[in-house]
Image: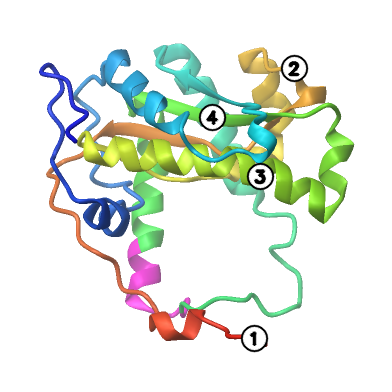
Amino acid sequence: MNNSSPAYPALGLTADEVLTTTRAVRKRLDLTRPVPRELIQEAVKVATQAPTGRNQQQWDFIFIDDPAMKAKAADIWRAGLMAGAPDEHDSAPLPTRMSFASSEWRRIRGSLGHLVEHLHEVPVLMIPVVRVARRAELDSIRGQAHNWGSVIPAAWSFMLAARERGLGTVWTVAHLTYEREMADLLGIPFDNTVQVALTPIAYTIGTDFKPAPRADDRKFSHWNRW
């Protein structure tokens, strides 16, 4: 079934095509073309159908399209990126299937540099959040799994729906080092609303995205034992 409206025609991708070609888009975000709020709302409508723990539906998306607000949000994100992750200098080996000496990683670093320079120019920024009774809920693995497992499927569904509508997105978390500062900027009640990511949204420059290089799928599967 084609869910596109006449004003905003969809690409007509199959389910597998959407799932395998929704890329982290940085360099190919069109900074010059406005993104209609109505189009974003179409993707939100799709996202509401994502599974959510106990059907609580305790997630929200905050969209920023005011230029002054975007500039301030982008500055907080950049500050978080410069600060680095809290465990960045941990001596434990980082679990990864990608070599940080690879050409793939060099391309990612290059595209990240592009986003650093232009984040404030992206038409819309989105911050997914999850509502909690208290932040202490996230102190346990079970509490984390319940809450992240409610908001992340919705956010991913939004990103898939955006891809079908010619929009590009990328999942970033750098600003969470300064989550309270972002909460103050956007009026988010910090004690019971937890930010999850910051996602730029723009039309893509071209729509011809392809599956990315990945490890052999058989290496991801474990049967009966680790």
Q: CA distance from mark 3 to mark 2?
A: 18 Å
Q: Name the residue located 75 percent from the left edge and 48 percent from the top edge.
A: 144
Q: Nearer the viewer, mark 3 or mark 2?
A: 3
What count of labels does the image hold?
Answer: 4
| Element on which disc 2 rests | loop
Q: Earlier in the sequence, mark 1 or mark 4?
A: 4
Q: Nearer the viewer, mark 3 or mark 4?
A: 3
**Label 1: which residue?**
224
Q: Name the residue located 46 percent from the left edge and 80 percent from the top edge.
A: 99
**Label 4: which residue?**
127
Q: Earlier in the sequence, mark 1 or mark 2?
A: 2
Q: Amino acid at mark 1?
A: Asn
| Element on which disc 3 rests | helix
Q: Earlier in the sequence, mark 3 or mark 2?
A: 3
Q: Quick check: 225 above or below 69?
A: below
Q: Amino acid at mark 3?
A: Trp
**Label 2: which residue?**
189
Quadrant of the image occupied by residue 217: bottom left
Q: CA distance from mark 1 to mark 4?
A: 38 Å
